[in-house]
Amino acid sequence: MLTPDQIQTLTTIAFCLEPLAEKSGCTTRTVDIVGKPLTDFLIAGISVGPAIRRFAASVITDERAPIFAEYCAALQMSTQYKSPKIISMGLLEIIFPVVYARLRCEERDRVVDVVVSVMQQESPQDVVHLSDARKIAWQTSGDVSKRAFDSAPFVSARSPWEFYERMHVQQGGPESSRQWAQEYFDGLPILRQVLDVLTGITDATAMVAATAQVHADVVAARPGVKVGMVADMCAAGLFLHLTFLQ
């Protein structure tokens, strides 16, 4: 089994490799999106490492450990040594269930199925963490619908999956939230695509190029898709791939 130290190291590597890839509409090694420079992505990716390590340790020692217990702490840690704007919400929201699933599954071709299944487990505590994380992250958003987030329709959900179901049908809610939920309902196809494309690649530069191609392919095939969500799935896929190289 992977150790907490390995999980921290590999998530940090994935978080730092992904933003280097050349991707339309995203910060890359050659393009800084206004308010989201490459340096901020690298700093945030490194800063959240201790929270991810603590999370991994809890999953190893407790079969019923909450999925998102470290989510809010990680969001707050992500702004250390950089601007106060939170840019890692989606990345953290996918990496916690992915780490959880990887620590429960040693099979590359089955691990994404486990990600989906753990999100369906009853966990009112995780619903609270998901709600609280939005209050923290979206207060720095330029999207009015995010800053106006009301947790009332969500807090009675019994699982992260049910939380997403309610988010998906929320009237006037962020389009990014609807797309995020739909990605889960469809079985995380982008994450599966990244993991499939990376198969057999051991060179980090080639991994970055491969994720850039996946990003381009998804954006071309799905007009209107949120490019940040695609990037987050690429980072999570990079992490999973790296873990199977150990």
Image (cartoon, rainbow, N blue to C red):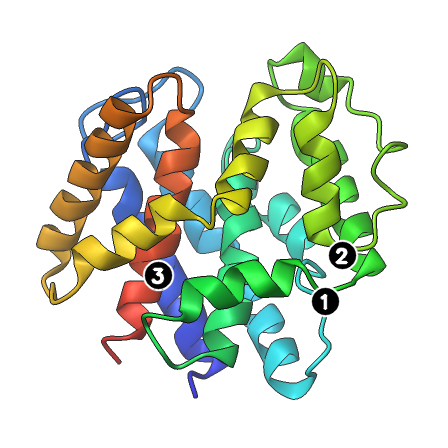
Q: CA distance from mark 1 to mark 3?
A: 20 Å
| Identity of the residue drawn at 55% across and 25% down | 176
Whether 78 is drawn above or below 46: the answer is: above
Q: Position of residue 140 (x, y in %)?
A: 64, 23
**Decide: marks 1, 2 in contact (CB < 8 A)?**
yes
| Label 2 element class | helix
Viewport quadrant of the N terminus: bottom left
Rendered image quadrant of residue 175: top right
Identify whether 178 is placed above or below 103.
Answer: above
Q: Residue at x 73, y 19 (%)?
A: 147
Q: Which amino acid type is marked by label 2?
A: Asp
On the rendered structure, is 239 left or right of 88?
left
Which residue does the numbered mark 1 point to in the structure image?
Answer: 66
Q: Which residue is mark 3?
A: 239
Crowd tier of the residue under label 1, counting other residues whose Cα lies within 10 Å: few below 14, some 14–19, many 20 or above: many
Q: Position of 127 compared to 80: left or right?
A: right
- The spot of residue 213 in percent (x, y) is 16, 38
Residue matched to label 2:
126
Residue 118, by quadrant, is: bottom right
Which secondary structure lies at badge 3? Answer: helix
Which percent across, then down, holds residue 145? 70, 15
- Residue 228: % across, % down: 41, 30
The Cα–Cα distance between marks 3 and 2, rounded to whole angstroms, is: 22 Å
Tell me the kind of residue under disc 3.
Answer: Phe
